[in-house]
Amino acid sequence: MTILQTLIFAIVQGITELFPISSVAHGVLTPYFFNWNLDPAFLKEHFLPFLVMLHLGTAVTLLLYFGTEWTKIIASIFNKDDKSRKLMFLILIGTIPAALIGFFLESPLRHMFSNVSSAAFFLIINGFILYWGEKLRGGGQGQKSIDDLSYKQAAIIGLFQSLALVPGFSRSGATMTAGFWMGLKHKDSARFSMLLATPIIIGASIVEVPKLIHTDITGLFQISLIGGITSGIAAFLSVWALMRWFGTNEINAMRPFAWYCWVVGFVVLVSQI
């Protein structure tokens, strides 16, 4: 990876990680669009740790953006703030499904990260999840705040988060859609999705980033670090824009993202013919 390629990758990742359009799919499709001839060995063995480093920049951004909430969550371990303590347990329970599935299926999933057609196909499916997921909310739903979630509902949202292990499915899109089905308002669903992202990204970083440090590819860790910083800056702008978008759009907020997934996925599949 060159510096220019890394910067482009980082900006794309920082935007797409929080927007419901699958950052992992864009990680697969970006080299394809720019016609980068990346080493297949890098794609299969080092691409996932490289992407995780970029995600780590996003996690730092989320910690800063939601710093007040995270401070209260951590403090609730030692005080009697029941509201923040419940939020901590909701996040913990919501993190478990993706963490377990990712741990046991890391090896077979790793080999999907160089498959352009697969990423494009699942990106189209992701578009349908976004579109119909918002349409199929039951009557009287969409009025809950995060405080109203049960632990069972948090686990269901967390299970949807594991879809993002497959390139093409969006972590934020899946968790926000599941949040809609659990009755959350758009803004609260987006907020819980952002809070839920932080521990899973940090957990993946603990596993994958050391592989970059000990890689035999000269300079890969340093380039990945630059990418992580750039990704964090792009992510900050993304989370600000996304929270404003869902704060002012309670109807059809997912429709533009669904159309984007359909168009990009279809164009890539047609180009493969």
Image: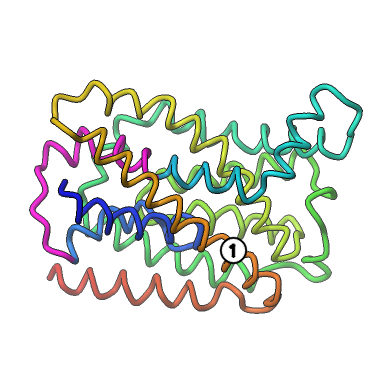
Residue 87 spot, x, y in % from top left: 77, 39
Residue 55 spot, x, y in % from top left: 42, 44
Q: How many marks?
A: 1
What residue sits right under mark 1 in the picture? 240
Magenta-colored span:
34-54
SS assignment at label 1: helix
Does the magenta portion include 48? yes
Query: The C terminus appears in which quarter of the rendering?
Result: bottom left
Task: Considering the whole magenta stretch, tell me its main secondary structure.
Answer: helix
| Residue at 48% from the left image edge and 56% from the top image edge | 235
Please say if 67 is above or below 140.
above
User: In the image, is 51 to the left or to the right of 47?
Assistant: right
User: In the image, is 149 to the left or to the right of 219?
Assistant: right
In depth, the one of 194 and 61 nearer the eye is: 61
Tag 1: amino acid: Trp
Residue 239 spot, x, y in % from top left: 56, 60
Q: Residues within 10 Å of mark 1 (few under 14, many from 20)?
A: few
| Residue at 16% from the left image edge and 65% from the top image edge | 34
Please say if 76 is above or below 18.
above
Please say if 152 is above or below 230.
above
